Amino acid sequence: MLQLKYFFLFCLLLLSQPGLSHETSLRLVTEHWPPMYFEKSGTAQGMAVDLARMIQKHLSMHNQVEVQPWTRAYKTALTQPNVLLFTLVRTPEREKIFTLLGPIADGDISLYMSAHAKNRKTITLDEIKRGLTVGTHRGTAFHNLLKQQGFEHIVPVNSSESAVRMLMSGRVEVLCDDDLAVAELFRRTGYKEKDYVKVASLKSSSLYFAFSQGTDPHLIRNWHTALTEIKRSGEFEDLYRKWFSHLKAPKEVLLLTPPVQAGFTLPETPVKTPQVAELLRFRPPYLK
């Protein structure tokens, strides 16, 4: 009986060790960018939020979605393990620091002007780059793309909706954002489709879930399996049609892992319980 008691104690201590259980909590963070994700009456909503909840239902998970300012959400994913940030525009730089799962949606990063201003003159992309002010959401793929393509008068602001308001009030001359969100952004700020016009497409965009470095690989594999099944079954296409009735849902499922997860270290914490190696060396008196 005493031998059995020591055996059970040994098993409980093993299960208590970090990394031996797959019941790791995953923190879900997103921003305000309707219709992909937004907060209404204190609850996260949107196309990507619905998909995250659909995947969690498949996995019997119940983590809440946190809606944060973009810069804070991005920093959280850069500095903490077991964080899911959604959604990210896939770029070569981000492939090096996040594990990306998707695509969740496909769009185009484009330039827009107010219909009134556009009707007064014809303008080229080069003229926009050299001479016009372009408003965009600070720290996003849109902001980075404008810098990469040589736009000279970028005006970064704290949200896409703020950029729309600045465009329509004349404080900037051009807006840079994604086709997926533009119609909803203008609608939410009180404007109709006739009030703005697309003047150029800069780059196609694919949006992904992004897992932070240090995230439990078992969690990532489970999300990959669940998304694959959801797309195979047609659930994803039905969800996509609900939010983007005029667009075709991406069918493929890609899991893109950084080649080397360098530059990320977890904070050291004191270990108060015996380590596995110590437990394996442990022998109760009556078992020696």
Image (tube, helix red, strand yellow):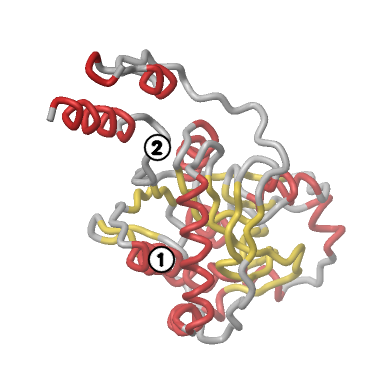
SS of the residue at dot 2?
loop
Residue 269 at x, y = what percent? 39, 16
Q: Amino acid at mark 2?
A: Leu
Horizontal placement of 250 versus 215: left or right?
Answer: right
Q: Nearer the viewer, residue 216 or 100?
A: 216
Foreground: 272 or 202?
272
**Nearest to viewer (mark 1 / mark 2):** 2
- Look at 51% across and 86% down and name the residue there: 245
Q: Residue at x 53, y 60 (%)?
A: 164
Q: Residue at x 49, y 74 (%)?
A: 229
Residue shown at 84% from the left, 66% from the top: 124
Q: Which residue is mark 1?
A: 55
Residue 194 - label: none
Q: Which image quarter is the C terminus in?
A: top left
Q: How many numbered badges does the structure rendering display? A: 2
When the figure is inspected, residue 264 is found, relative to residue 69, above or below; the finding is: above
Residue closest to the eye, 90 or 281: 281
Q: CA distance from mark 1 to mark 2?
A: 24 Å
Q: As shown in the figure, which amino acid type bears the numbered disc 1?
A: Ile
Q: Is residue 66 above or below residue 275?
A: below
Q: Position of residue 188 (x, y in %)?
A: 41, 67
Q: Which residue is mark 2?
A: 20
x, y (%) of residue 282? 34, 17
Looking at the picture, does residue 37 appear above or below residue 274?
below
Is the residue 30 above or below the residue 214 in the image?
Answer: below
Secondary structure state at the residue bearing disc 1: helix
Image quadrant holding the N terminus, namely top left
| Disc 1 crowd, CA 10 A, few/some/many (<14, 14-19, 20+) | many
- State the image coordinates of residue 129 (x, y, percent, origin top left): 81, 53
